[in-house]
Amino acid sequence: MIRDYRKKQEELRQVQYQLDHLGACTTVGKTNKEIAQIDERFFLACEKADALKAGLQQK
């Protein structure tokens, strides 16, 4: 049980790192398709982070 909790914490740290990176990406010089891909990855990471946080709070 503690391992699962720590595993979720580590996964949340990784997702937070991804969010920080994607949030800092510049869109200057990017095509609309590239910007859309960055946005999609960012919002998917947000959803994953929310799900992980909810899972950690249930414990």
Image (cartoon, grey):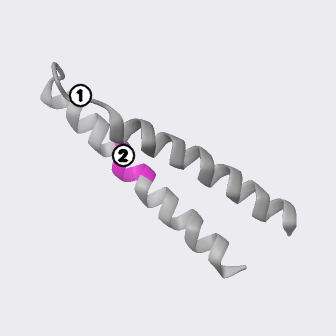
Q: Mark 2 or 1 closer to N-term?
A: 1
Asked whether 10 or 48 is in front, the reply is: 10
Left-right relation of 31 to 48: left
Image quarter in which the C terminus is found: bottom right
Horizontal and vertical percent position of residue 16: 52, 49
Residue type marked 2: Phe
Residue reaching furthest to the right? 2
Residue 43: within the magenta? yes
Residue 7: within the magenta? no
Image quarter in which the N terminus is found: bottom right
Horizontal and vertical percent position of residue 30: 18, 22
Residue appearing at x 35%, y 52% in the figure: 43
Asked whether 25 or 36 is in front, the reply is: 25
Instruction: Name the disc covering residue 12, or none.
Output: none
Q: Quadrant of residue 27?
A: top left
Left-right relation of 48 to 23: right
Instruction: Considering the whole magenta stretch, tell me its main secondary structure.
Output: helix
Q: Name the residue under label 1.
A: 34
Q: How far apart are marks 2 and 1 (CA)?
A: 12 Å
Asked whether 50 or 23 is in front, the reply is: 23
User: For the residue labelled by badge 1, is the local secondary structure a helix, a strand or a loop?
Assistant: helix
Left-right relation of 54 to 23: right
Residue appearing at x 42%, y 56% in the figure: 46
Region rendered in magenta = 41-45
Q: Name the residue under label 2.
A: 42
Residue type marked 1: Glu
Horizontal and vertical percent position of residue 53: 57, 68
**Relative height, residue 37 to residue 43 (above, below):** above
